[in-house]
Image (cartoon, grey):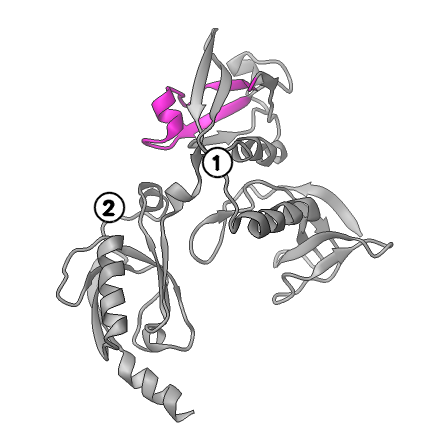
């Protein structure tokens, strides 16, 4: 049985690589048994129609699971099939529900979306938006988020704008109404480039300014280890997801392109050992990846 179709999680839900997920949709809450490992299976109605894709099991109550609404799933699938990726727009605003704050800000019930914070150097900041602004309209159409459950729909309105297009906002700031034009940037610009180091058994991401803030990193120097293969050279030699690689062999400071270029050369040369300078929990350490040892084990199988 489905108990609600708009379950909202106020805490940030993140993928293993650190990115936020579930930003653009609420969840279907069901008492169908969804156990760890069942993600990806369909949630069907009595007519056999798929209404959602099971995505998460709960650990805080029995017989409660959550599914992604099928309309979101179809949209993502079609975008990947047609374009090879899902392109979403982003302007850099963090919003919150207006419930219990209408009297302070002077808005009517079900009117406006409260801007709680602005990401530094984001399109929203460049356009002049400020924390405490109330967005009344987007492209001359009223928007509101009195309750937290309404926030994903607001973010999706932004995400659905074509990358590079202008978003026209009507904003209440104090007792004034102002008009702001924000240019939509592609969300991928703030997530960073990816690289899978197959020969070494891990993946990395370029560190963007937003990633640095969200992961409490000192700066954007180095590359972020977004995943480590459970069975592989990196895992066996102590590399962990969340490490920041600052150096590679003789290169003591590097950015993503430096890492990419050096990795390409070493992988083609079938380097047997690589030395990583890693930043972890505020301290620096060396991790020696012995690629030759792991390769020898695979060859023996």
x and y percentages locating residue 25 in the rendered image: 61, 42
Choose top left, top right, bottom left or bottom right for residue 5: top right
Lower sequence index among marks 1 and 2: 1
SS label for mark 2: loop
How many tags in the picture? Answer: 2
Q: Can you say which quadrant of the picture contains the C terminus?
A: bottom left
Instruction: Give the residue pinned by disc 2.
Output: 219
Residue at (52, 51) in percent of width and height = 84
Vertical order, 213 against 288 (above or below) = above
Q: Position of residue 181 (x, y in %)?
A: 44, 19
Query: Which is nearer the eye, 100 or 196?
Result: 196
Q: Identify which residue is drawn at 62% across, 32% down.
A: 150
Residue 1, disc: none
Q: Given the current orientation, which residue lies at the most extreme right position?
A: 47
Magenta span includes 117: yes
- Residue range (magenta): 113-139
Residue at image position (43%, 56%) is 17
**Pointer 2 local density, CA inside 10 Å: few below 14, some 14–19, many at least 20:** few
Q: Does residue 80 sit above or below 118 in this rendering?
A: below
Q: Is residue 168 above or below residue 3?
A: above
Instruction: Identify residue for label 1.
Output: 89
Distance in Å between CA atoms under marks 1 and 2:
25 Å
The reply to whether the magenta stretch includes residue 43 is no
Residue placed most toward the observer, 100 or 152: 152
Residue at 37% x, 77% y: name it: 232
Label 1 packing within 10 angstroms: few (<14), some (14-19), many (20+):
many
Answer yes or no: is residue 255 visible: yes
Where is residue 45 drawn, in percent x and y? 82, 53
**Does residue 86 appear left or right of residue 91 in this picture?**
right
Question: Measured from the top left, where is residue 233 in percent x and y?
Answer: 33, 77
Residue 278 appears in the figure: no
Outermost front residue: 82
């Amino acid at each position: 049985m489905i108990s609600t179709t708009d379950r909202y999680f106020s805490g940030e839900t993140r993928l293993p690589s650190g990115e936020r997920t579930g930003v653009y949709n609420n969840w279907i809450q069901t008492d169908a048994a969804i156990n760890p490992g069942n993600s990806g299976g369909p949630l069907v109605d009595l007519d056999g129609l798929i209404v959602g894709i099971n995505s998460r099991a709960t650990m805080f109550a029995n017989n409660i699971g959550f599914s992604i609404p099928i309309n979101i799933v179809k949209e993502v699938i079609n975008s990947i099939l047609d374009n090879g990726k899902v392109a979403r727009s982003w302007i850099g605003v963090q919003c919150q529900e207006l419930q219990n704050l209408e009297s302070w800000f002077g808005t009517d019930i079900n009117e406006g979306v409260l801007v709680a914070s602005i990401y530094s150097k984001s399109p929203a900041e460049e356009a002049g938006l400020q924390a405490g602004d109330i967005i009344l309209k987007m492209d001359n159409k009223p928007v509101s988020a009195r309750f937290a459950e309404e926030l994903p729909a607001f973010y999706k309105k932004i995400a659905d704008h074509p990358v590079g297009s202008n978003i026209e906002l009507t904003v209440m700031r104090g007792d004034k109404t102002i008009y702001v034009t924000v240019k939509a940037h592609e969300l991928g610009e703030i997530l960073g480039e990816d690289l899978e180091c197959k020969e070494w058994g891990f993946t990395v991401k370029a560190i963007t300014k937003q990633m640095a803030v969200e992961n409490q990193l000192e700066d954007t120097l180095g590359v972020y280890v977004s995943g480590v293969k459970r069975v592989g050279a990196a895992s066996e030699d102590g590399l962990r997801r969340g490490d920041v690689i600052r150096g590679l062999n003789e290169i003591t400071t590097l950015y993503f392109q430096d890492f990419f270029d050096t990795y390409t050369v070493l992988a083609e040369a079938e380097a047997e050992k690589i030395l990583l300078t890693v930043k972890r929990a505020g301290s620096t350490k060396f991790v020696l990846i012995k690629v030759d040892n792991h390769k020898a084990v695979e060859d023996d199988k």
